[in-house]
Image: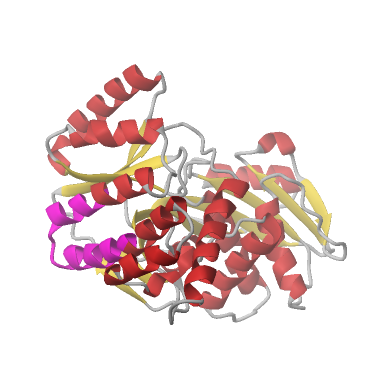
Amino acid sequence: MENRIKMFFKLFNNVKKPEVFFAPGRVNLLGEHTDYTGGLVLPCALSNGTYLLAEKRSDKKICLYSKQFSSTGILEFNLDDSLDLTNTWADYPLSVIKTLKSKQISISNGLNLFYDGTIPSGAGLSSSASIEVVTRYMLDVFFNLNTPLINQVLDCQFAENKYIGVSCGIMDQFAVSFGKKNNAILLDTNSLEYSYAPLNLENKKIVIVNSNKKRSLNNSSYNERFNSCSEILKILKKQMDISYLGEIKPIQLEECNKYLSSELLIKRLNHIVLENCRTKLASNYLTENKFKLFGDLMFDSHYSLQKKYDVSCFELDTLIEISKSIEGVLGARMTGAGFGGCTVHLIESNIFDDFSNEINNIYFEKTNIKPSIYEAIPSNGVCKLSTGEIYHA
């Protein structure tokens, strides 16, 4: 943290210590591509995240700097201007500020903002949501907006939908905001009702493996999945009394399939409906410490994402198959939007070293890519830190 503060002083030529904020990343344990259909998700916040060092200015300038994208230097904007997006990392904080401006919420001063993230970019662990949420939270504190946290979450989702152009659901921003140490969150993305599911890991670990294949699920591919689900809903609403796909039960699938025009739409719906069931079951299994059964659902989820939702890739499938062959691995699946990024694994603690060696060696042999492996530590959500606090070096 001292180094961050020194960099802040050097960049912005000031002598007053900045305020420090932190928002975690997230890993989704189960419930993938269900959050934009009103379904269930089961994420947890991570100890890795985004640090934001911030101070008010006396003028209207917004000055943005990212340690991860230092080549862009300090990007300057004026609050009185339209804050045009730049097709850089800065679009995430800018979109949040634009959202507040669109609601006529007053931001009276400019800001110096320094971001330092410990989430791998493009890994599917919500680095973008982390930036959005920490920015929105900081604005609330600095300008005494007194906005309920759930409304801050909705502002961040709106920013990503409207300005970034990704038709994401609410899971990422929600998990980053409402995370709780040693717990996952079972979230109903339709009603926004949620409960915490305890992660009594004891002699187990949640491990994230970054395939280091940067996600190629671009905005258009993600939005294509979203649009398929919108098409399914439009068709089914003409035939059945439903409001959103997340309310469809497995027993209704046979009837639904009769109304759908293609095998592709049938596959998409099948994943959404059964993934919801898996997610509800998974939360129960966590509460009951039934980790073997939880792990089985992780494998089932991956194969559904691979074969029915078509969002996996060779690298992710390879990591899952290697995992399945290692004794002491209870479950594994791709996590995030797909086509690269990360897998999440539930393992016995005592096999961590052997697991890491096997993954490293076999994955490199099959892909010529070195993976990154680290333990996921379920952590708290967005917060303001004292300058002495630190979650992750």
In the image shown, does 228 or 258 lie closer to the viewer?
258
Image position, residue 328 (x, y; %): 13, 39
Please indicate whether residue 62 sits to the left or right of residue 338 in the image: right
Instruction: Tally the marks.
Output: 0
Magenta stretch in the rendered image: 274-298
Image position, residue 23 (x, y; %): 50, 58
Corner quadrant of residue 178: bottom left
54 falls in the magenta region? no
Image position, residue 49 (x, y; %): 48, 51
Q: Residue at x 35, y 66 (%)?
A: 180
Quadrant where the C terminus sits is top left
Q: Residue at x 13, y 66 (%)?
A: 288
Q: Is residue 217 visible?
A: yes
Q: Is residue 31 visible?
A: no
Image position, residue 108 (x, y; %): 79, 73
Corner quadrant of residue 277: bottom left
Corner quadrant of residue 327: top left
The secondary structure that most of the magenta stretch takes on is helix
Q: Residue at x 42, y 55 (%)?
A: 268
In the rendered image of this protein, does residue 3 appear above or below residue 391? above
In the image shown, does 56 or 376 lie closer to the viewer?
376
Residue occupying the far right of the picture: 81
287 falls in the magenta region? yes
Q: Residue at x 38, y 75 (%)?
A: 247
Q: How is the image coloured?
A: secondary structure
